[in-house]
Amino acid sequence: MNEEQFAKGHKIRSEVMGASYVDKSVEDADDFMRPMLELTTEYCWGEVWSRDDLPRKTRSLLNIVMLTALGRPTELGGHVRGAINNGVTVEEIRGAILHAAIYCGIPAGIDSARVAHGVLKDLGKI
């Protein structure tokens, strides 16, 4: 593992997803999960999210749409929180999910809308 890249990824991940969420994921990582945490933090957050070719807001919207397409509600919930941290509005999140629903299927859109609604409600945004 590249410690410098991991540290950069950890910083960005904490800024986007929230420090308490990230700290808990690090604390909870056992011997089985630690390699996945390290891989994700180093490459996803340290390599890709650190690039300056797309703003974080755009990356967040892309993640919402891709996670809708893939049917990954757990990850979607985290990225809805991250999107809010990155300045994405409730209206933009709704719009991204509606757009994804047309291309990915209404059931995927409904599931994602439900997840996003719950997260946004918990955050006091709706």
Image (spheres, rainbow, N blue to C red):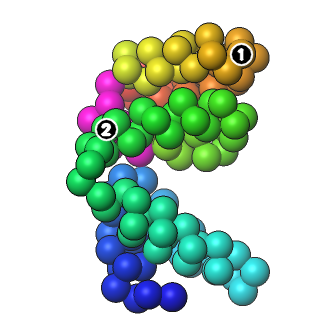
Q: CA distance from mark 2 to mark 1?
A: 24 Å
Tag 1 or tag 2, which sits nearer the N-term?
2
> Which span of residues is magenta-colored?
82-89
Residue at the extreme front: 53
Which element type, helix, strand or loop, lies under badge 1?
A: loop
Question: Which quadrant would the C terminus be assigned to in this image?
Answer: top left
Q: Is residue 64 left or right of residue 103?
A: left
Q: Position of residue 42 (x, y in %)?
A: 46, 74
Provide the residue designation for mark 2: 57
Provide the residue designation for mark 1: 105
At x 72%, y 35%, the residue is: 71
Q: Position of residue 110 (x, y in %)?
A: 68, 17
Q: Which label number is shown at residue 92?
A: none
**Residue 18 is covered by the magenta coloring:** no
Which element type, helix, strand or loop, lies under badge 2?
A: helix
Q: Position of residue 102 (x, y in %)?
A: 62, 11
At x 71%, y 16%, the residue is: 105
Amino acid beneath label 1: Gly
Q: Is residue 93 left or right of residue 75?
A: left
**Residue 84 is covered by the magenta coloring:** yes
Pointer 1 local density, CA inside 10 Å: few below 14, some 14–19, many at least 20: some
